Amino acid sequence: MKKVILTSLACASLMLAASNDYKYEITPMVGGAVTEGNTDLEEHFANAGLAIGFNQKDLFFDQFELGFLQSIGDVNYENANRSTSITRLFANIVKYYPINSDLSLYALAGLGYEHFDDEFAGNDSGGFGNYGAGVRLAFSDDIALKFDLRHIIEADHGDNTLLYNFGVAIPFGKIAKAPIVVPMKKAAPIMPPKDSDNDGVIDAKDDCPDTMSGAQVDKVGCITLVNLNINFDTDSSTIKDSYTSKIVEFAKVMKSNTKLRATIEAHTDSVASHAYNQKLSERRAASTVQALKDLDVDPSRLKSVGYGETRPIATNDTVEGKAQNRRVHAVIDK
């Protein structure tokens, strides 16, 4: 009958689940034992002991229990003038099944060893198996009451003993909970300051918006130098049609801002004499000024100057370098 009751309790508890926020649990216990009649021991006697539970998180059980129970005083043999003390050591796995936040059922099973100080009538020291079920009632995070029934089956002869235990469970070694990570909102992308005319000066500091492409500007975005990209043929001051677009664009800048004045600077390569190149550069500057006048730029705001071969920007030893030196710049005067 005892086996039926314990088995029913264990099966019923399998429908529940449990968790534990502590690493360990120590449980002082008191209780009693009920022996079978064939052991020749007195039928009831008292026990006391201690159990330590090692709580588990990632296994199929919730706790590994190590403990002992010691008979309180000697246990009498019924048909002899003899007695013995009984010490039982046990190791069990425990599974918890919570009913609510305070109340849990649990099932246990494991192995143990029992020691008889006076071995008599087949009561020999040796191993045993046991299983059981219990109830755990928590009063706070720091204390809980436990009651369980355990059925012991002795290994050599199959003798049966029923243990009932009352305990006070004290958890310790609280497990630190992982901090709650609050996802950060994705920061809006930082847009670079706007530079509408791409002159290197942001709009907020640009006093001269819509600067023509390729022009050099000062710190407030106003034109200081424009390369008109006119490359003259050798010994020529004639502007070829392929260079007209840049002159037209510069003329629009001059007409849109009537405060601007420009000095047209022309240069040559080193072919021919210095004096000849000086005159050639002056003709090239004058030719460019005339092209701007033809585009309705006020001639009073234009001045031309030639520097001959005195200010090269590339070597005169190559065809390419000479072509770069045959150039025209517009220097802006405010």
Image (cartoon, grey):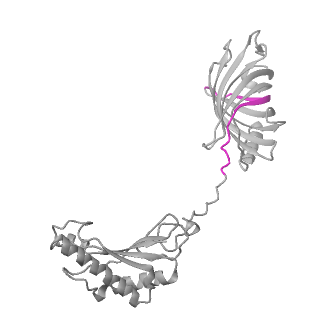
Measured as percent of width and height from the top left, residue 233 is found at 21, 81
Which image quadrant: the N terminus? top right
Measured as percent of width and height from the top left, residue 192 is found at 54, 64
Report the residue at 31% width, 79% height from top: 285
Report the residue at 73% width, 33% height from top: 150
Quarter location, residue 24: top right
Q: What is the residue that sits farthest to the top in this orientation?
A: 81
Q: Is residue 225 left or right of residue 159?
A: left
Viewer-closest of 138 and 92: 138
**Residue 161 magenta-drawn?**
yes
Position above or below: 167 against 334: above
Q: Which residues are magenta?
A: 156-181
Position above or below: 14 against 246: above
Measured as percent of width and height from the top left, residue 279 is found at 23, 77
Quarter location, residue 315: bottom left
Quarter location, residue 304: bottom left
Count of marks placed on residues: 0
Position above or below: 22 against 212: above
Q: What is the residue that sits farthest to the right in this orientation?
A: 139
Q: Is residue 230 visible?
A: no
Viewer-closest of 135 and 55: 55
**Residue 231 magenta-drawn?**
no
Q: Is residue 302 visible?
A: yes
Q: Is residue 56 left or right of residue 15?
A: left
Report the residue at 79% width, 36% height from top: 141
Measured as percent of width and height from the top left, residue 264 is found at 36, 76
Viewer-closest of 168 and 306: 306
Report the residue at 21% width, 72% height from top: 269
